[in-house]
Amino acid sequence: MDPPSRKVAQETKGFMPDDEAQALYDAGVLGSRSGPIVEIGSYCGLSTLYLGSAAKAVGTTVYTIDHHRGSEEHQPGEKHHDPELYDARAERFDTLPALLRTIAQGRLCATVAPLIGLSEDLAGSWSLPLGMVFIDGGHSERTAQADYEGWAPHIVRGGLLAIHDVFEDPAEGGRPPYNVLRRALAGGAFVAHSRSGSLRVLKRLE
Ligand code: SAH
Ligand code: MG
């Protein structure tokens, strides 16, 4: 099984360049061998396509989490707002219909389970050991740290923690994902496994 078809990926809105997507797919294949994957931040399912194709190849599941109302930067008037994803009747941003379309087009209905809600709420009631966690949700310090605190403990030994939008240089992007990376490495439980662009993959040692 290969990464998702170029056509489906090209038709999917999202924030993941090709090289990072390929690295995410490779990490997904490795992580899936240790257990299911949790993705925080589905948006319209671009990264989900890659994690889902990887999990399908190995025979496991991706749980992809989002409240689907968008982060701060997706709201009307903000830098990454997309008017096509605004539901005028409900008067809110809504990426769930796009995610469901992407899952179907990627033939991942039996592999990807969308979970609709707040990451921190779902983390509090989670008990399934995980082969991989991909943190790509809210980019505030509070949200990014809560994602790490809530989800990293569920990763099994040998499993992977992937973090997106990690920028060493503050001129390139916000601090919270980088701060989470440093915290994970400083804690001693994770070591660096791979990197591609702003995607960092760590492996759990203990
Ligand atoms: N992984 C996607 C991009 C995710 S954008 C891609 O590859 O294209 C970040 C997403 O995180 C947004 O859709 C937003 O709604 C979601 N999000 C932000 N904070 C969240 C939270 N606390 N709980 C659940 N989802 C959250
Ligand atoms: Mg991202």
Image (spheres, rainbow, N blue to C red):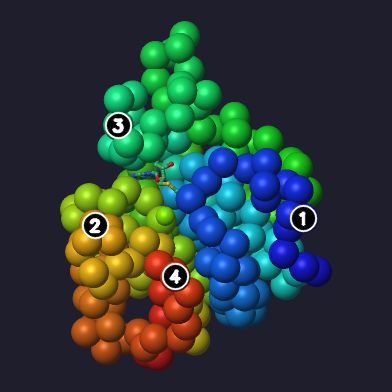
The residue at the point 74 percent across, 41 percent down is: 104
Q: Nearer the viewer, mark 1 or mark 4?
A: 4
Mark positioned earlier in the residue sequence (4 or 2): 2
CB atoms of marks 3 and 1 within 8 Å: no
Tell me if the residue at label 3 has its CB under 8 Å from ligand 1.
no
What's the CA distance linking mark 4 and mark 2?
15 Å
Question: Where is mark 3, residue-wise?
Answer: 78
Residue 172 percent coordinates (x, y)? 28, 61
The residue at the point 41 percent across, 74 percent down is: 200
Amino acid carrying label 3: it is: Glu
Mark positioned earlier in the residue sequence (3 or 1): 1
* Nearer to the camera, 180 or 85: 85
Residue 22 visible, this orientation: yes
Question: Where is mark 1, residue-wise?
Answer: 5
Question: Where is mark 4, residue-wise?
Answer: 197
What's the CA distance linking mark 1 and mark 4?
22 Å
The residue at the point 50 percent across, 60 percent down is: 38
Amino acid carrying label 2: it is: Gly
Per the rendering, the mark at residue 174 is 2
Mark positioned earlier in the residue sequence (2 or 3): 3
Amino acid carrying label 4: it is: Gly
Above/below status of 200 relative to 128: below
Relative to 21, 74 lies left or right: left
